[in-house]
Image (cartoon, rainbow, N blue to C red):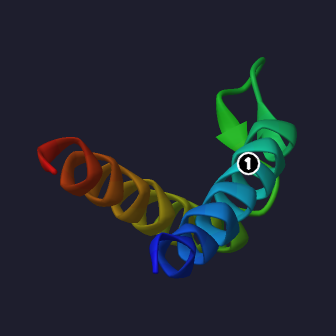
Amino acid sequence: MENKNNVPVFTFSIVAIILGAALYKQFDFETLKFEKPALAIVYSIVFVFSVVVLIKNFIKRTEK
């Protein structure tokens, strides 16, 4: 039954990588602004959610 818990970890890690790369590409370092601020907000919310889920899973797995 351990494999059942690995599916969300894999999925959320892929989501975090893709959204992190998208946020990095959209950020303009010269003006310190995003190209599309509304889309960046949505990306940031989902990115933070996926990282929180990954951290909770990591903490839960280390307690066992």
Q: Is residue 6 above or below residue 51?
A: below
Question: For numbered disc 1, what is the local secondary structure?
Answer: helix
Q: Residue at x 20, y 56 (%)?
A: 60
Q: Residue at x 71, y 72 (%)?
A: 39
Q: Which residue sits furthest right? A: 25
Which of the 4 image quarters holds residue 54? bottom left
Pick whichever, 25 or 54, lies toward us.
54
Mark 1 belongs to which amino acid?
Answer: Ile
Q: Which residue sits furthest front? A: 1
Q: Residue at x 53, y 82 (%)?
A: 4
**How many dots with numbers?**
1
Image location of residue 53, percent across then percent down: 37, 65
Which of the 4 image quarters holds residue 62? top left
Pick whichever, 20 or 37, lies toward us.
20
- State left or right for residue 39 relative to residue 28: left
Q: How many other residues sit within 10 Å of disc 1, few (<14), some (14-19) or many (≥20)?
A: few
Pick whichever, 39 or 10, lies toward us.
10
Image location of residue 36, percent across then percent down: 78, 63
Image location of residue 34, percent across then percent down: 72, 47
- State left or right for residue 59 relative to residue 39: left
Pick whichever, 45 or 37, lies toward us.
45
Residue located beneath label 1 in the image = 17
- State left or right for residue 8 relative to residue 16: left
Q: Which residue sits furthest left? A: 63
Q: Residue at x 16, y 51 (%)?
A: 64
